[in-house]
Image (spheres, rainbow, N blue to C red):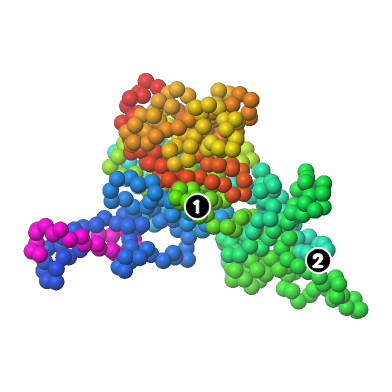
Amino acid sequence: MKPHELSQDKVFVSAFVTEPSEVHVQIGPAFDMTKRSVLDLRDSAMAYRLSAQLPEPSPATIATPVARSGPFAPEDYTKPYCEFMTANPTIFHAVDGFTRQLESQGYKRLPERETWNSKLEKGGKYYVTRNGSAFISFSIGRDYKSGNGMAIVAGHIDALTAKLKPVSKLPNKAGFSQLGVAPYAGALSDTWWDRDLSIGGRVLVQDSNTGKVESKLVKLDWPIARIPTLAPHFGAPSQGPFNKETQMVPIIGVDNSDLFQQQAPSKIDQDNGIKPGTFAATQPEKLVKVISKELGITDYSSIISWELELYDSQPAQVGGLDKDLIFAGRIDDKLCCYAAQEALLASSDSTSTSSIKMVGMFDDEEIGSLLRQGARSNFMSSVIERITEAFSPNYGPNVLSQTVANSFFVSSDVIHAVNPNFLGVYLENHAPRLNVGVAVSADSNGHMTTDSVSYGFIKRVADRCGSTLQVFQIRNDSRSGGTIGPMTSSRIGMRAIDVGIPQLSMHSIRATTGSLDPGLGVKLFKGFFDYFEEVDKEFADF
C-alpha cells in the first residue's frame, strides 16, 4: 500500500499506556512513511495489550472507564461493573477505587482542611472525600461563570452489612470461636444464613516514628465466618423468629482446647504479642494476627482502631441462559454510583461547557443520612458554596442562590424491579423491568423528590440521548422507602428528581439486576451531563 490508498483489509492496532497519551501508528515498513492515525487514549479501557488480550488486573483495584469508538453499547459495562463490585466489597474500598479511577483520569484531590480559591480553575477536574466513606467529584466547564448552574447526580455508596462491635472478642462456646457483630440497617436478615462471609474495611495504625495515624484498607480473600442455620429436624426452634444477638452470631473457627486442658493451671498468654489495655486486646487474637499479617503490621499495639465488616464473599457474576442477568451483593446503591461515575468520565468536555458536572456518593443513607458523611450533612452544600465563591468577584448569598436556582439534582437510587412471582404487590403500569432503562421514582407523599417539572426535564434528556424511561410508584396499601433526594433538594433548594436502576431482591445479601442495566444507567446520566444546558434552556421559567 502507498500512503492514502484504501485497503479492504482490517488492521487492528493495540497499545497499552499508563496515562493519557498520543499514539502514532505507522503503516508499512519504511520509517519515513506517513503516520496514519492519532488515537486519543483518554479512556484507559481502550488500552489493550499488543497481543490483543485485555490487560491483566493490577494489584490496585482501580475501576477502568469504558471506552467507546462507536454507538453507545450498554453491554460494554457489564463485565467492568461485575469486576468493580467484586474488587471493592466495603464502602472504604469502593470510595478508594472510585477516587483512584478519578485520579487516573486527571482529577485532583482537594483537602477539606485547605481553602480552594487558588486551586480551582476553569476546565479543571477535582474531587474531595470525607471520612473515607463519601466523596464528591466535579468537572468545571471551560466557560463556567459564577452563578451558572450545576448538573448533579448523586446516590449513596453504603450497603447493608454486619459491622464488628467495639469489643468483638467473645468467649468460646461449645468448641466454636465466634465474632461479635452488629447489623447495619437491615442486615442479619434471613438471607445472611449459611453464607460464606469474608471480612474487610479500614484499620487505623499509628506510625511509631512520626506518631501520625494512617488508614489502611484490608480485605481477606477467603471466607472467615458463617452464620449456621438450625436444621429443620429440630422443629419449632428452627423456624424462628430468631434473636439477632444470641442466635445469629457468626462462627469463625473451631477451638476444642477446653477438652484438653493440662492438669497444671493454664499459663496466661504473655507471649502472644498483644499487650493488655490496647485495642488489639479487645479483639479476637487470631483475627488481630491475620489482619496484621495482611497489612504487614508487626506491633499489634500500633492498631488504634478499625472499622471492619462482614460481606458475602461470592463474586459478582453474569447469569441466566442468555447471560442477561447480574447476580451480586451490595447492588444497592453501588449500581447507581457506578453508573454516575462512568457517565461523568464519559461526558465530553465539549458539552455543557458553561456549567459544572458533579457526582456525589454519600454514606449512611441506609440509617438516615444523619452523620457528617451523609446526605443530610453540609458536605454537598459546602462544596457548592466553595466553588461558587472561588469564581465570584463579589461572593454572597445572592450569587449562591442564583447558582442553586440554575442547578438540577438527580437523586439516583436503585428501584424495585417487577418480581414475576409477586405481581400483585406492584401498581399496574408502574412495575419497571430489567434491561429496559432507568425508572423515575414517584411518590405522592414526598418520599421522592419527583414533580412534573423535574420529570419533564429528565424526559427531555432521555429523548435527546435515546434512553427509555420507566416509572415506579408504590401501591397505596404498601410502605414507601426513601432516598437522599428530598433531604438534599430541600436543604439546598435545587430542582430535583428521583430515578433508579431496577433490581430484584432489594436489601437481600445478594440481589439481581439486568446485564444491560449498568450501561443503561450510564447512558441516561451521560445524556444528563451532555445535554444539561440545552434542556435547561427549555425550562428557563422553572
What element does badge 1 sit on? strand
Q: Identify the residue under disc 2.
A: 175
The N terminus - image quarter: bottom left
The C terminus - image quarter: top left
Identified at 47% across, 57% down, the residue is: 83
Identified at 35% across, 23% down, the residue is: 540
- Is 191 on the left or on the right of 431, as rendered? right
Asked if residue 418 is positioned above or below residue 311 in the image, the reply reads above
Contact check, label 2 and label 1, Cβ < 8 Å: no
Amino acid at circle 1: Gly
* Mark number, residue 319: 1
Q: For the stretch drawn in magenta, what is the main secondary structure?
A: loop
Asked if residue 209 is positioned above or below residue 317 in the image, the reply reads below
Task: Tell me which corner region of the image, top left, top right, bottom left or bottom right, holds residue 366.
Answer: top right
Q: Nearer the viewer, mark 2 or mark 1?
A: 1
Tag 1 or tag 2, which sits nearer the N-term?
2
Identified at 13% across, 59% down, the residue is: 7
What element does badge 2 sit on? loop
For the residues labelled 2 and 1, the Cα–Cα distance comes to 39 Å
Q: Foreground residue, 205 or 481?
A: 481
Residue 346: where, in percent of width, then height?
Answer: 35, 47
- Range of magenta residues: 1-24
